[in-house]
Amino acid sequence: MKRIFIFLSIIMIFVLAGCGGNKYDDAIDSTINQYKEHLKKEGLTYSDVKRNNAIVRVFDEGKYIQFAFYLKDHSRKLSPYIYYEKLGDTYERMKRMPGNGERDRLGLDRKKPDYEEVKGKETELKN
C-alpha cells in the first residue's frame, strides 16, 4: 500500500510540474534567442535583451510574436518593437514593421493579444 501511495505521489508531482508556464514559452524564448543572434552578427550589444526585461505579446494563437526591451540610461523607455512570424515550424523576423508598435500592416495593434507579459510576468488581459 505504501508503494502505491508513493508511486501516485510521484506521478502527481510530475503532472503538477508540467502545468507550469504557458504554451508560448518555447516560442518566446526561441524568438528572443534568434534576435540575440541577429544582434551578435551585426556586432551590437545585447545586454538588455532578456525576457525579464521585455514586453512580449503573442497573437493569433502563436502565429505572431511582438516584443520590445526596456532601455536603461537612454532617452527612450523602450527599444523598437520586433516582430516574428511563424512559418512552418520556425519563426522568422518580419521586416518593414513599425518600431513604435502602432499601425502595422497586419493590424496587430488593433487586436487583443492571446498572451502578454511585462518583465517576465504575465499580464491580465481585459476582455
Image: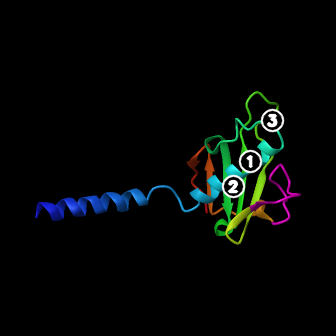
Is 30 one of the magenta-colored residues? no
In the picture as drawn, the residue positioned furthest to the top comes out as 73
In the picture as drawn, the residue positioned furthest to the right comes out as 96
Residue 104 appears in which quarter of the rendering? bottom right
Q: Residues within 10 Å of mark 1 (few under 14, many from 20)?
A: some
Give coordinates of residue 110: x percent, y percent.
76, 62
In the picture as drawn, the residue positioned furthest to the bottom comes out as 88
Magenta-highlighted residues = 92-106
Q: Nearer the viewer, residue 30 or 101?
A: 30
Query: Which amino acid, by three-letter code, is at mark 1?
Result: Glu
What secondary structure is found at the residue carrying circle 1? helix
What secondary structure is found at the residue carrying circle 3? loop
Q: Nearer the viewer, residue 27 or 57?
A: 27
What secondary structure is found at the residue carrying circle 2? helix
In the picture as drawn, the residue positioned furthest to the left comes out as 1
Judge depth for marks 1 and 3 and give the one in front: 1
**Is residue 52 left or right of 5 when viewed as pictured?**
right
Q: Residue sitting at 74 percent across and 35 percent down?
A: 71
Q: Residue sitting at 57 percent across and 54 percent down?
A: 124
Q: Please give the label number shown on residue 37.
A: 1
Cα–Cα gap, marks 2 and 3: 23 Å
Label whose residue precedes the other's in the sequence (1 or 3): 1
The residue that mark 2 highlights is 31
Decide: is 29 above or below 89. above
Label whose residue precedes the other's in the sequence (2 or 1): 2
Residues marked 1 and 3 touching at CB (< 8 Å)? no
- Check the picture and name the quadrant holding the N terminus: bottom left
Query: Which amino acid, by three-letter code, is at mark 2?
Result: Thr
Is 103 one of the magenta-colored residues? yes
- Check the picture and name the quadrant holding the C terminus: bottom right
The residue that mark 3 highlights is 76
Query: Which amino acid, by three-letter code, is at mark 3?
Result: Arg
